[in-house]
Image (cartoon, rainbow, N blue to C red):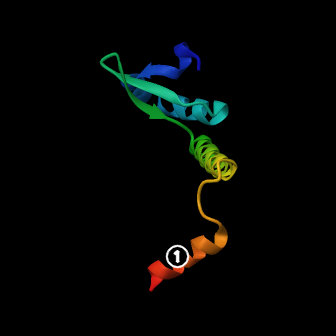
Amino acid sequence: MDIIKDIRPLTEFKRETAKFTNRLRETGKPAFLTVNGKASLVVMDANAWQDMQNRLEYADSVAGIRKGLAQIRNDEGLDADAFFDTLDATAK
C-alpha cells in the first residue's frame, strides 16, 4: 500500500471518479477513502475483489484440511462407517 496514493478523501474520489477507476483497474490495489480524516470506505476493482475472495476461500479450505489432518493424527473424530451410520440415523 502506498499511503500517498491509496488513502484519499471521499470528496477527491467524487471529483475524480474516472481517474480513480482507471488507477484501480491498472493497479488492482484498493483505495481507502476517508471522511473527516477517518477511514470510512474501501473501493477496489471487481476483478481484484474476486481474486481476493478466491484466495480467502482457498485459505479456508486449506485450514479445514489441516484441521482434519490434525484430528486424524490425534485419533479424533469418527471413521467413515460410524459417520454414515450416524448420518443415516439422523435422517430417519
Q: Look at the picture and state if 9 lies above or below 28.
A: above
| The quarter of the displayed image where residue 80 is located | bottom right
Q: Look at the picture and state if 32 lies above or below 71.
A: above
Q: Look at the picture and state if 89 lies above or below 36.
A: below
**Is 67 on the left or on the right of 91, as rendered?**
right
Q: Amino acid at mark 1?
A: Leu
* Quadrant including the C terminus: bottom left
Residue 8: x and y, percent?
45, 20
Question: Which residue is found at the position 53% from the left and 13% from the top?
Answer: 4
Residue most toward the front? 75
Question: Which residue is found at the position 57% from the left and 43% from the top?
Answer: 49
Nearer-the-camera pick, 62 or 47: 62
Question: Which residue is found at the position 52% from the left and 34% from the top?
Answer: 18
Nearer-the-camera pick, 26 or 29: 29
**Is 43 on the left or on the right of 59, as rendered?**
left
Circle 1: element type: helix
**Is 64 on the left or on the right of 87, as rendered?**
right
Q: Which residue is mark 1?
A: 87
